[in-house]
Image: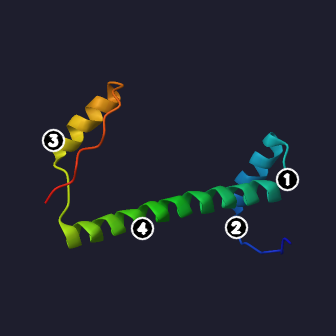
């Protein structure tokens, strides 16, 4: 069930939201709800990406397994050319 939440907007931002609501034929409430939902979704994905990077860095520090830039670049070039190339094996 949805619960009411209060938010304080400065006059300029409130006016922008109202203007957008008018031209989109939506309520200000709908515009703000959509904006918040899109922001939260984007930031959740950004945080998941950040956590993946931190886990990868931690794994690299523990194992030392990696690819060189040249190895990764050659593999990506094959993929870009449409080849079904297997990723190279990581090494120390």
> What residue lies at 71% left-to-right and 62% top-to-bottom?
11
Dot in front, 1 or 2: 1
> Is 64 or 25 nearer to us in this picture?
64
Labels 1 and 2: the sequence-earlier one? 2
Q: Are marks 1 and 4 in contact (CB under 8 Å)?
A: no
Q: Which residue is mark 2?
A: 9
Sequence-earlier tag: 1 or 4 = 1
Q: Looking at the rendered structure, which numbered label has been put on residue 51?
A: 4
Residue 72: percent from the left, percent from the top?
23, 43
Instruction: Tell whether 68 sits left or right of 82.
Output: left
Q: Residue at coordinates 32% horizontally, 24% vertically from top-left?
A: 81
Which quarter of the rendering shows the C terminus? Answer: bottom left
The residue pinned by badge 3 equals 70
- Location of mark 1 (residue): 27
Q: In front here: 17 or 85?
A: 85
Q: Residue at x 18, y 42 (%)?
A: 71
Q: Is residue 29 left or right of residue 36?
A: right
At label 3, counting other C-alpha atoms closer than 10 Å, the crowd grade (few under 14, some 14-19, many 20 or more) is few
Sequence-first tag of 4 and 2: 2
| Front residue (pair 1, 60) | 60
Q: CA distance from mark 1 to mark 2?
A: 16 Å
Q: Residues within 10 Å of mark 4 (few under 14, many from 20)?
A: few
Identify which residue, 37 or 70, lies in the foreground: 70
């Amino acid at each position: 069930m949805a619960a009411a939440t209060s938010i304080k907007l400065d006059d300029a931002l409130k006016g922008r939201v109202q203007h957008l609501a008018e031209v989109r034929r939506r309520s200000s409430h709908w515009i703000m709800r959509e904006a918040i939902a899109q922001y939260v979704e984007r930031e959740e994905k950004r945080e998941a990406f950040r956590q993946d990077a931190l886990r990868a860095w931690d794994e690299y520090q523990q194992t030392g397994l990696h690819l060189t830039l040249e190895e990764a670049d050659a593999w990506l070039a094959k993929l870009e050319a449409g080849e079904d190339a297997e990723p190279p094996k990581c090494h120390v």
